[in-house]
Amino acid sequence: MVVKVIEGKEDKITMPDLLTDLKKNNKVDYCGAIFSFEGIVRGKEENMDLEKLILTTPDKEKTEKEIEEIVENAKIKFNVTEISVVHYIGEFYTGDSLFLVAVLGNHRGESLEALKEVIEKVKFDVEFKKEEISKQGTKTILAGG
């Protein structure tokens, strides 16, 4: 399992890295599904052309622990083999990766549901601050936005 909150360019983990790691799991022989999600920076918002996005969290270690808890709960609830999550913080531009989730499970149904739950719970339950900066001004969005 990989669960990391990574600042900007300090350490780059890609979706292929997560998928390769999941396929090395010693229970992969019993699995028939991997679902993945990659959240990227959108360059266009309502009446706004994004110049850059700044994503922060007040306590990186606490945020990582909260994500680990979400992952562990989803693994139990949906009976999936493994879930890996990487969330980046720092300064980003259109197309940059912000949030990676990959789920390894026995079947597609529970694997997809686990993926959805992790995405939504991290978005709504973990404290992030997103600042979208454009020529029209700065829009600030807190957890849940």
Image (tube, grey):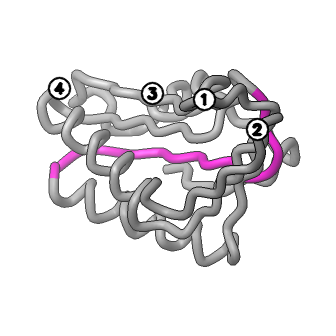
- Whichever of labels 2 and 1 marks the residue nearer the N terminus, that label is 1
- Whichever of labels 4 and 3 marks the residue nearer the N terminus, that label is 3
Question: Residue at point 70% right, 44% down?
Answer: 132
Identify the residue position indicated by label 3 in the image.
23
Identify the residue position indicated by label 2 in the image.
136
Question: Residue at point 61% right, 49% down?
Answer: 87
Q: Are marks 2 and 1 in contact (CB under 8 Å)?
A: yes
Q: Which residues are magenta?
A: 78-93
| Percent x, y of residue 26 | 39, 39
Identify the residue position indicated by label 4 in the image.
108
What is the C-alpha distance between the residues marked 3 and 1? Answer: 42 Å
What is the C-alpha distance between the residues marked 4 and 3? Answer: 15 Å
- Whichever of labels 3 and 1 marks the residue nearer the N terminus, that label is 3
Q: Residues within 10 Å of mark 3 (few under 14, many from 20)?
A: some
**Residue type, label 1:** Asn
| Callout 1: SS | loop
Q: Is residue 88 located in the magenta-colored stretch of the structure?
A: yes
Identify the residue position indicated by label 1 in the image.
47
Q: Quadrant of residue 40?
A: top right
2 vs 4, front mark: 2
